Amino acid sequence: MPGPRRGRVINKKRSSPLGPFEMVVALVLISTLGKIWSSRQTHGETRGDLSDGGREELAAVRESMDDLSIRLGRLEEERDFYKDLLEAPKGRREISPPESE
């Protein structure tokens, strides 16, 4: 028959891994997250739902993005044109000034 275990000390004072301040913060955090989650569940809000106003706004944003991409393309073409013009030394010699009358 095994006897009582010797050599192992059991600590009667068992402290919580969290202090009182950390416990309060954890409870508030859990409570807040629970309220947010339950409000989304009851209201039926999802990320993919769009109202009519949201669809109009999305269409306006897409149109603005298209306009900006066209403008960006033009600016890139102009940049490349001027870059080629500056890099071509032969091109400068071939351009002659206008003749005066």
Image (cartoon, rainbow, N blue to C red):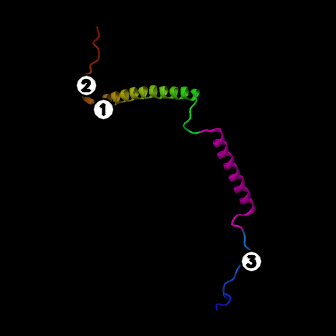
Q: Nearer the viewer, mark 2 or mark 3?
A: 3
Q: Which residue is mark 2?
A: 93
- Who's the residue at 72% across and 73% down the image? 14
Q: Label 2 to label 1, Cα distance in Å?
A: 12 Å
Q: Nearer the viewer, mark 1 or mark 3?
A: 3
- Who's the residue at 66% across and 49% down the image? 33
Category of crowding for the residue at label 3, using alpha-carbon neighbours closer than 10 angstroms: few (below 14), some (14–19), many (at least 20): few
State the image coordinates of residue 57 (x, y, percent, origin top left): 55, 27
Category of crowding for the residue at label 1, using alpha-carbon neighbours closer than 10 angstroms: few (below 14), some (14–19), many (at least 20): few
- Tell whether position 12 is magenta: no
| Left/right of residue 93 with respect to residue 64 in the rendered view | left
Q: Give the residue furthest to the top.
A: 101
What is the magenta range?
Answer: 16-45
Pointers 2 and 1 in contact (CB under 8 A)? no
State the image coordinates of residue 18 (x, y, percent, origin top left): 70, 64
**Label located before the other in sequence (2 or 3):** 3
Q: Label 1 to label 3, Cα distance in Å?
A: 83 Å
**Label located before the other in sequence (2 or 1):** 1
Q: Label 2 to label 3, Cα distance in Å?
A: 96 Å
- Height in image: 100 above or below 39? above
The amino acid type, in three-letter code, at marker 3 is Lys
Q: Which mark is residue 12?
A: 3
Q: Which residue is mark 1?
A: 87
The amino acid type, in three-letter code, at marker 1 is Glu
Category of crowding for the residue at label 2, using alpha-carbon neighbours closer than 10 angstroms: few (below 14), some (14–19), many (at least 20): few
- Tell whether position 21 is magenta: yes
Task: Identify the secondary structure beneath mark 1.
Answer: helix
Quarter of the view holding residue 94: top left
